[in-house]
Image (cartoon, helix red, strand yellow):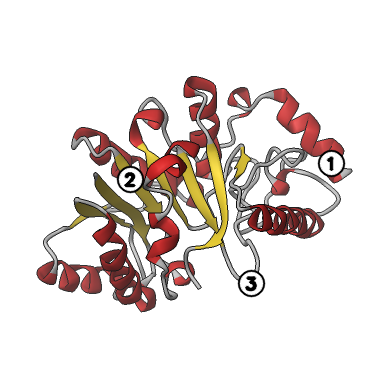
Amino acid sequence: MKCCFCGTVRNCGPHLQKNFQNIEILSKLFEDYEIIIVYDQSHDNSLEILKKYQTKNNKLKIYVIPQLISSFRTHRLAHARNICFNYVKENNYPLFIMMDFDEVNAKQVDSTILEKYLIGEKYNLWDSLSFNTSPKYYDIWALSIFPYCFSYNHFTNNSQHNYYSIQNYINKILKYKKNKNELLQCISAFNGFSIYKTNIFKNCEYDGRLNLSKIPPKYIFNHKKASGGNFILHDYGNVNGIYEECEHRLFHISAIKNNNAKIMISPDCLYF
């Protein structure tokens, strides 16, 4: 089966070489592959490194965003990821991997962890599959899991408290699931690397805007109750909660609503 590796690059220069080495290892699991990178304006030599690698590997395609399309990071990320996803659909890739090209995936990769979910009965257990990270699960921004069904940044009782409460919660569950050799189903998860079955997500899109009309009210109610706080709209400086929301969440929620998607997390670490 063919797979398209997708991602966005902005100021990722120091990590690109190792990320590409890891993709080359993982690509051996598929019949054929391509790499689609959307490059946003950077302050380092990321574009130079990308073009140099492209001369060695013609599987890489680079899309350059010519100017800063928004001052909001999640809006830019959603735009770039949708460019990747549109390419996936237009070129009939049955699988695609959305990944970050920073230090998270610039470690050693264990391809056998991904391989076991591509064959046999395990392949039918997921529509989206992300993985644990060591020493802790880190991507609490993209995570929605009952009862923490929404964004930790949008509740009082301070975001730092919410972050660590949710991180402790997810790590405890993943430890249990690892002992049981089971996947964990959730509402949304990314954690820097996720593989998708394209047909289940074909009528979805990434959206980095805060769009409460697309969030089931029960999600906010459950998160409010679990966090012991109230819903807020706050500008944190690095994230403006008035206008920004994690671009992965609506992508996953739409797939659940439209296609009953199985959003799963493996308790195993793909990178170590």
The numbered mark at residue 119 is none
Q: Along the polypeptide, which appears first: circle 1 or circle 3?
A: 3
Q: Is the residue under label 1 in contact with that under label 2 (CB below 8 Å)?
A: no
Residues 85 and 198: in front is 198
Q: Along the polypeptide, which appears first: circle 2 or circle 1?
A: 2
Q: Give how far across and how far down residue 91 sits, in percent.
A: 18, 37
- Report the residue at 58% width, 48% height from top: 142
In this figure, which residue is indicated by the disc labeled 2?
96
In this figure, which residue is indicated by the disc labeled 1?
226
Residue type at tag 3: Pro
Q: Along the polypeptide, which appears first: circle 3 or circle 2?
A: 2
- Return the residue found at the far bottom: 14
| Mark 2: few/some/many CA within 10 Å (<14, 14-19, 20+) | many
Residues 149 and 179: in front is 179
Q: Is the residue under label 2 in contact with that under label 3 (CB below 8 Å)?
A: no
Q: How far is disc 3 from disc 2 in space, using C-alphas? A: 26 Å
In this figure, which residue is indicated by the disc labeled 3?
135
Residue 240 against residue 124 in the figure, above or below:
below
- Report the residue at 78% width, 44% height from top: 155
Q: Secondary structure at mark 1?
A: helix
- Viewer can see residue 117: yes
Q: Secondary structure at mark 2?
A: strand
